[in-house]
Each structure stands twice: as structure tokens, then as C-alpha cells.
Image (spheres, grey):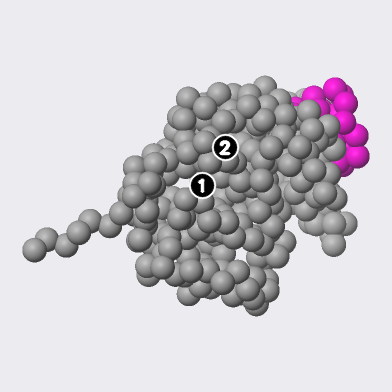
């Protein structure tokens, strides 16, 4: 399965770089030697992301981390160069010869714009925003009225996001002073790391009612027991298909691996014996099987995973894949759903059209009907 995935990705990257090559040699007058050098550079860059990913999965050292960062950054820029190249090559094939000089001027402008957008994306991805969301929960105990929970997901600690990034997140969360912190999976990127050292900054979180974690799909890339042991060692509670009652509010946490299958997910929720007279929050990595959660009596599901695709216009695809629940606050009948775009990145370390966010959930009760 992994070999097929790598093969498909490699073929796609090959086609993407081939189109970039065709656009560049059409746009610029290059000698035969220049075309050869450009071709060699693009071939090396083409396979660098896959190769660096393999290295990072098996080794953890300075070289593999730097190699991955460079190749991932190039992949992000190459995506926008590819989009521009497609438009340029298409226009070149349909417009008359007399328009070539004008088209070339626009081509250079759009290639420059692709580079500028990519650079913006690199900086924007490191700018962590605070998103405030008011959540109305039925039967909310008075002690929870106006209280806050912070939700973060998709930190992806690994070759790109390390201990300093974790410290930055922790500092921002502590400034918010929430009652509890919820971590919705993909805390780790799934590559080879020092599991305890890289996550240790999260030990400095100090919410009064605790920090809770559920696994994401990236924790399943390796033996997740290594990750879970490190997480528990710093005082974070791992919710493994279980329910906790915290000052009258029910918190349910389900493993990503166990929640993918709809029937299995349904059985898990049924076995938890959720009290529908108490407000219930479901911490679940992917915004899927929402109807099952709603029928089980969940009042609020919070998820991540989608990253809102990280880069425009790929967010169009996530919108359809997750049926409109790929980002932000929405309702499904009586159940509220919030899907975060995440705070870290996977693959290309850039964001265009999406934010790196820490979500602050402020709880309140439904307004009383007017008499």
C-alpha cells in the first residue's frame, strides 16, 4: 500500500515538474546547456520530497531535518509554479503566434507572483492566530458559564516544527488562561524524533481542569505507544475511546483509528452510555461520521485533520470531501461542529487561504425564550 502511494506521488510530481520545465524553456531563451542544467535541477527537486520523507521516517539528525525542510519548501513553491505553468502552456497552445511576446510578459509577471505568494505562505504559516468561538451547550452547569477551553490540532512536531514551535504554542495558550486544553490529534508528524524531548514544552501547560489528547492519523504512522508514553509522561491525559465527566460536562475522546469505520465508531459511542441530560463534547480527529455522533447525543464535536488544505485552491477539494465541514463552525441538526485548520503544517510549510490557529471555545447556555 505504501509503495503504491509513493509511486502515485512520484508520478504526479514528475508530471508537475515536467510542465514547469516546458513552461520555463518556452518563456526564457535557454541554450542547450541551459536546458540540460535546468532539467537536472528539476529532476533532483522532483524526487527530493519523497526521498527526504523516507530519510526522516528512518533517521533523526540535522541533515535529514534540513533536507526535508528545503524539499518541503520547494514543493510548496513548485505547486504555485505548476499552476502558473499550466495556464501559460495552455495559453501558448491556443493563442496566435502574434500574441507570444505579450503572453511572455504576462508569463514572467505570473511566475514572479507565484514566488511572492509562496514566500507569503511561508511567513503566514508561522503566524499563529487566536480564533474565538462562542459555543452554546444545553444543560450547561453554572460553573461552566463563560468558561474557556482551548482546542489545538495538527501541530505535526517533527522535522519542520520542533521544540521552539511547541514552546511558542504553549506560551500563547497560557496567556489565554483556559480551564482546559484539548488536543485533537497529529501532535506528532509521524517521522523519527525524540518523542519526549520534542513534546516536553507541553508539560508547561497549566489549565485548571487538565489537558486531554486523542490520536490522529499521523500518530499511527509509527508504533503509537512511543508517542502515547511520552504524552502521558508530561501529564497529558490520553482519551482512548472513553468518557470523562468534568464538573458536570461530559468529554468523550475517540482514537482516530477506531473512528474511521462507521459501525465500530457507532458501537464505541453506544458502549460509553452517554447521558443526554448532560452537555457532551466529542474530541475526534477527523470531521467524519457526524450523523452518528449527533444521534448518540453529542452536543459539540471538535476536529482537525483537514488543515483547510493549507493552500488555495486545494481547499475547494476539502470542502467537497468533508461535505462542507472541512473548516469552521457549523450545525448538524442540534449538534455543533467546529473543524480547525490546525496550528502546524504537513508537507509544504506554507499556508495560503488558511490560518494556523489556536481555537478558544467559550461556553454559554441557550438564551431563554422571550415571554
Q: Is residue 136 above or below residue 276?
A: above
Q: Say if the magenta span includes residue 61.
A: yes
Q: How far separated are the C-alphas under marks 2 and 1?
A: 8 Å
Quarter of the rendering containing residue 68: top right
Q: Give residue 266's position: percent from left, percent from top.
A: 61, 74
Q: Give residue 275's position: percent from left, percent from top.
A: 48, 69
| The one of 369 and 128 positioned closer to us in this rendering | 369
| The magenta segment | 50-72
Residue at the image point whose x is 48% and y is 38% from the top: 179
The residue beneath circle 1 is 340
Q: Residues within 10 Å of mark 1 (few under 14, many from 20)?
A: many
Residue at the image point whose x is 39% and y is 41% from the top: 147
Quarter of the rendering containing residue 371: bottom left
Dominant SS in magenta? helix
Residue 232 can be seen in this image? yes
Q: Give residue 40's position: percent from left, percent from top.
A: 84, 32
The residue beneath circle 2 is 343
Looking at the image, residue 345 sits to the left or right of residue 297; the answer is right
- Quarter holding the N terminus is bottom right
| The one of 122 and 243 positioned closer to us in this rendering | 243
Amino acid at each position: 500500500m505504501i509503495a503504491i502511494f509513493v509511486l502515485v506521488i512520484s508520478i504526479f510530481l514528475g508530471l508537475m515538474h515536467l510542465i514547469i520545465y516546458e513552461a520555463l524553456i518556452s518563456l526564457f531563451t535557454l541554450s542547450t546547456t541551459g536546458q540540460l542544467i535546468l532539467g537536472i535541477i528539476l529532476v533532483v527537486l522532483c524526487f527530493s520530497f519523497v526521498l527526504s520523507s523516507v530519510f526522516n521516517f528512518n533517521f533523526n539528525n540535522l541533515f535529514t531535518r534540513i533536507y526535508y525542510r528545503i524539499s518541503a519548501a520547494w514543493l510548496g513553491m513548485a505547486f504555485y509554479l505548476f499552476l502558473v505553468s499550466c495556464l501559460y502552456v495552455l495559453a501558448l497552445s491556443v493563442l496566435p503566434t502574434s500574441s507570444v511576446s505579450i503572453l511572455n510578459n504576462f508569463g514572467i509577471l505570473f511566475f514572479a507572483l507565484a514566488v511572492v505568494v509562496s514566500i507569503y505562505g511561508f511567513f503566514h504559516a508561522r503566524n499563529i492566530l487566536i480564533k474565538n468561538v462562542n459555543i452554546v451547550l444545553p444543560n450547561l452547569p453554572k460553573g461552566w458559564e463563560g468558561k474557556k477551553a482551548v482546542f489545538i490540532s495538527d501541530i505535526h512536531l517533527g522535522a519542520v516544527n520542533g521544540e521552539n514551535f511547541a514552546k511558542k504554542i504553549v506560551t500563547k495558550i497560557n496567556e489565554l488562561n483556559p480551564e482546559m486544553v484539548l488536543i485533537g490529534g497529529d501532535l506528532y508528524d509521524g517521522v523519527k524524533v525524540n518523542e519526549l524531548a520534542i513534546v516536553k514544552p507541553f508539560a508547561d501547560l497549566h489549565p485548571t481542569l487538565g489537558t486531554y489528547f486523542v490520536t490522529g492519523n499521523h500518530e499511527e504512522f509509527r508504533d503509537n505507544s512511543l508517542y502515547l508514553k511520552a504524552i502521558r509522561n508530561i501529564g497529558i491525559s490520553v482519551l482512548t475511546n472513553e468518557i470523562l465527566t468534568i464538573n458536570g460536562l461530559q468529554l468523550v475522546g475517540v482514537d482516530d483509528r477506531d473512528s474511521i469505520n462507521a459501525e465500530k465508531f457507532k458501537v464505541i459511542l453506544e458502549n460509553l452510555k452517554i447521558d443526554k441530560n448532560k452537555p457532551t463534547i466529542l474530541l475526534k480527529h477527523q470531521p467524519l461520521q457526524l450523523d452518528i455522533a449527533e444521534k448518540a447525543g453529542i452536543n459539540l464535536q471538535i476536529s482537525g485533520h483537514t488543515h483547510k488544505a493549507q493552500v488555495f485552491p486545494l481547499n475547494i477539494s476539502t470542502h467537497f470531501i468533508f461535505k462542507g465541514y472541512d473548516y469552521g463552525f457549523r450545525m448538524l441538526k442540534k449538534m455543533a461542529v467546529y473543524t480547525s485548520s490546525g496550528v502546524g503544517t504537513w508537507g509544504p510549510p506554507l499556508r495560503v487561504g488558511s490560518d494556523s490557529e489556536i481555537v478558544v471555545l467559550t461556553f454559554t447556555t441557550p438564551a431563554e425564550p422571550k415571554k
